[in-house]
Amino acid sequence: MNPPVASAGATAAPSGHAPTPIIVEPKKPNGTVDAGLKSLQHYKYALPKWRYDLRQALLPLVRWETPHLAQLQSKMRTPFLDSYFAITANLGTHTFFMIGLPILFWCGFRDFGKGLVHILASGVFFTGFLKDMCSLPRPLSPPLHRITMSGSAALEYGFPSTHSANAVSVAVYAVLLLHSPTNTFSPNTTLALEALAYFYAFSIVLGRLYCGMHGFLDVVVGSVMGAAISLVEFYYAPRLEAWLYGSDYWAPLTIALVIIALVRVHPEPADDCPCFDDSVAFAGVMIGLECGTWRFARYSSLAAIYSGPDAAFDLSALGWVRAVARLVVGVAVIFAWREIMKPTLLRVLPHLYRVIETHGLSLPRRFFTPASEYKDVPLRLRDDNVLPAVSDLPKLVRSFRGPGRGRSVSIGPQSAADAYETLAYRERRRRESRGSDAGSPAGIKGRASMGSLREKAALDGESFSTAVDSPVVTAADSYLGGDGDELGEREVFSRVVKPRVRYDVEVVTKLVVYTGIAWLAVDAILIAFESIGLGAAHLAVR
C-alpha cells in the first residue's frame, strides 16, 4: 500500500473534536500515483539530492537527542513549570513582537524599535529558510510530550528554533546597547536590565526543550543565528541607515527588490510547513519599515522629533493620557488596515491571477492552490500566525488566564514530518530487531539502544500519567510498534493535524498587508497624530 500524504485540504473541525483528515496518495510530477514510493523514501523523493544529503547528515543528531530530551522532561516536569513555559513561550512569538514593536515608534524609541524589527524579521526569515531547506522533524513524540499554546507551532519543522533565535537576538542586542556609550541608565539599572535580558533568553531557550518542541541542535543553532544577526545589526546597520537616508528613492526600492527576491528563492519544503507564510509576513514588515522611515526622514517636518540622537521627543512631556490615547488609536488603525485590506485583496487578486495563469506567467509554490482551481477564497481564513484578527483577540487574552487554559499537552505525530519520522523509526526498529535475532553485532547494539529508548518512554508514561488519559508507553506501543497492535500508515497519518488549504494569492496579500502595517506604524500614524490633537510637534520647541 502506498504511504499516505497529508493533504492541505483538510476540513476544520468543531472545537474539541479531531480534524477531519483528507488522505491522498503521493504522486509523481506527471500526476500519476507512484506505486513504489514508501514512507522511508519520502524525503529522497521530495528533495533535491544535495538537500536530501544534508538532511540525512543532520537527522541522526535529531534522533540521538530524543531519549535524552525525554529524560530531561520527565525529571523537570511539574504543573507550575508546564504553565510557566507554555505561557512565557508567547514572549518569543511573532504576535508578541508585532503588537509591541509599533509602540516603540510612537513613544520616541524609533532607533531601538527599528533595530528590533531588523533582527526579528531577519531571524524569522532565515530560520524559516533553513527549516524548509533541511525539512528536519521535531524530536519524536512519544516519548516526548509537547506542551504548547499554539496549535500551529508543531506543524513547522524543528531545525532551527525560531523562538530561540528571537529571544537570543533581542537579549544580545539589548546587552550591546546597554554597554554602548549612548547608554544613559545608571550602573544599577544597567545591571538589572542586563540580568533581565539574560534571564529572558535562557527562559525561552530552556522552555523549548522542556516543552518538547525542540532539541538541543535546534536551540543551539537558533541561538547562534540570533546572536550573529544582532551583532551584524549593531555594528553594520548604522552604515546602511546613512546610505539609505542619503540616497534618492532608488535606495528603498533596491532594498524592497532584494527582499522580494529572497522571498522568491525561499526553499520549497518537503511537507506542508507554514514557515514560508511567516517569512513572507516579516519580509513585508521589512519593506514597509525601510520605505516608511526613508520617506519620513526625508520629507516629514516631524523627523527631528523622532529620529537621531538629537530627537526632541519626551514621553513625560507628552503626558500619560495623551501617550495612552496614541497607543489606542495607533493599534486601532493597524487592525483596521488589516481587516479592510486583507479581504479586499482576497476578493480581487484571484481574478488577476487567473489572467496571469492564462499567459503562463504564474510562479506557483508547492502546497499553494492556483487560482484556476478555486472559485473564491474564504474571507476569514485562519491563516495568520503573526498578527491575530480582531475576532481572535478575546481568545488570545483568555489563553493567559489560569494554568490550564489555552495550554495543551499532546502525544503522537502532529504534522506530516512527525508521521514520516514515526514510520521511519518504527521500520528502523524492525530491521534492528531482525538483525539482533540473526546474531548480528550491529543488530545487538541497535536493539539495546532502542530498548533503552522504550524504557525511557515507559518511565515518562509513569511520570506523565496524570496529565493525559493514557500513559506514554501505550502511545509509544501504538505509534512506534510495541508488543501490541501497530497503527498502520494510514492510521498514523489520519491522526495528523492537517494544514488548511492555502491559496496562491495569500503570498501577495501578506506582503501588501504587512508592508502597509509597517509603513503606517513608522510614517502615516505619526503624521495622523498631529491632525487629531495627539501630536508631539510642540515638543520640538524648548
Image: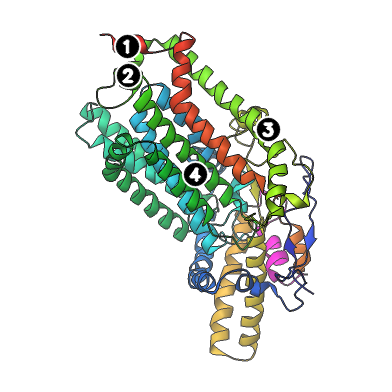
* Circle number at residue 344: 3
Distance from the alpha carbon under mark 2 to that under mark 4: 28 Å
Residues at marks 1 and 2 touching, judged by CB atoms closer than 8 Å: yes
Q: Earlier in the sequence, mark 4 or mark 3?
A: 4
Q: Which residue is mark 2?
A: 305
Q: Callout 3, which amino acid?
A: Thr
- Which quarter of the rendered picture does the N terminus lie within? bottom right
Q: Secondary structure at mark 4?
A: helix
Q: Residues within 10 Å of mark 2 (few under 14, many from 20)?
A: some
* 294, above or below 491, in the image: above
Q: Which residue is mark 4?
A: 283
Q: Earlier in the sequence, mark 3 or mark 2?
A: 2
Q: Earlier in the sequence, mark 1 or mark 2?
A: 2
> Is residue 498 among what the camera can see?
no
Q: Which residue is mark 1?
A: 539
Viewer-nearest of labels 3 and 2? 3
Residues at marks 2 and 4 touching, judged by CB atoms closer than 8 Å: no
Residues at marks 4 and 3 touching, judged by CB atoms closer than 8 Å: no
Query: Residue 127 in magenta?
Result: no
Instruction: Describe the colour scheme in one phrase.
Output: rainbow
Is 206 situated left or right of 31 in this image? left
Distance from the alpha carbon under mark 3 to that under mark 2: 35 Å
Distance from the alpha carbon under mark 1 to that under mark 2: 7 Å
Query: Residue 476 in magenta?
Result: yes
Furthest toward the bottom, the residue is 439
Where is residue 48, by image quadrant? bottom right
x, y percentage for residue 514?
Answer: 54, 36
Q: Earlier in the sequence, mark 1 or mark 3?
A: 3
x, y percentage for residue 191?
Answer: 26, 34
Q: Callout 2, which amino acid?
A: Ile
x, y percentage for residue 469?
Answer: 72, 50
Q: Secondary structure at mark 1?
A: helix
